[in-house]
Image (cartoon, coloured by chain):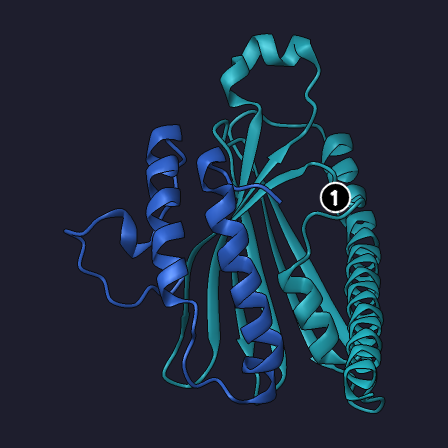
Amino acid sequence: MNSVGEACTELKREYDQCFNRWFAEKFLKGESAEDPCGQLFKRYQRCVQKAIKEKDIPIEGLEFMGPSKGKTENSS
Amino acid sequence: HPWETVTTAAMQKYPNPMNPSVVGVDVLDRHVDPSGKLHSHRLLSTEWGIPSIVKSLIGTCRTKTYVQEHSVVDPVKKTMELKSSNISFTNLVSVDERLVYKPHPHEPDKTILTQEAIISVKGVSLSSYLEGLMANTISSNASKGREALEWVINRLNAEIEEFTASARGTMRNSMAAAAFVEK
């Protein structure tokens, strides 16, 4: 499955693999502890944020879109 | 299928042959809240294969529709809730969907899905025929959704079998090699 930003697809795949493994083997079994995919997620995120801005996709209510917004929890 | 299987499959739902129009999936945000529930915000990109005459009316750069999805997985209560709404540039029709997966109360190997969709039409008034058409599409999409998860579950099982078979083969080879060395 591709990413909305073509350049992000590889980063997305690496993150997805890590997440899917953690989700099925740890999180669902109640061992939520640490999410080991933090670094991969950050790299993937930076790429996606850029792609969304470039493509002008109107996403509302997510904190990463505006550092000046300062919302800590979104309650959509 | 048990709730854990369905939930795992739902997280990896795309791509699947029942939803060929979904061309991209991205995670915008993901975190575990203080009560231990996993929240994920995802962006789905869909390409509908719009006829060229429509494309020329709306402009070719706008052929993608986007769906924003918020899911919450509670591993203790065993519920997964998905809320999605479409973001589209035309903004005429919006569809909000809500799905909840829970274990079957009497049969632990099964999962119950409840699904609702709210269709809102603004601006240009569409005929009731079109609204009815959308409602039909959404209810047939509901069964398509079940088929899609079934497909993903089968795929995941096949991957596990393949992995186990090749691991067995590797073990046999290395055991044979070890026996050879011992001699």
Tint of chain B: cyan
Side (left or right) of B51 relative to B91: right
Q: Is residue B80 visible?
A: yes
Q: Return the x and y of residue B126 as percentages of the image width and height.
A: 65, 28
Chain letter for the residue marked with disc 1 in the picture? B
Q: In this figure, which residue is indicated by the disc labeled 1?
A: B19
Vertical placement of residue A36 versus B140, above or below: below
Classify residue B92 by image quadrant.
top right
Q: Is residue B69 visible?
A: no
Q: Return the x and y of residue A64 as percentages of the image width and height.
A: 28, 53
Q: Pick the quarter of the image with the N terminus of chain B.
A: bottom right
Vertical placement of residue B125 versus B73, above or below: above
Q: Residue at x 38, y 37 (%)?
A: A52
Classify residue B143 by image quadrant.
bottom right
Q: Return the x and y of residue A11 as percentages of the image width and height.
A: 46, 49
Vertical placement of residue A61 versus A25, above or below: above
For badge 1, the amino acid type reads Asn
Q: Which residue is more in the foreground, B94 or B141?
A: B141
Q: Residues within 10 Å of mark 1 (few under 14, many from 20)?
A: some
Q: Pick the quarter of the image with the C terminus of chain B.
A: bottom right
Q: Which chain is blue?
A: A
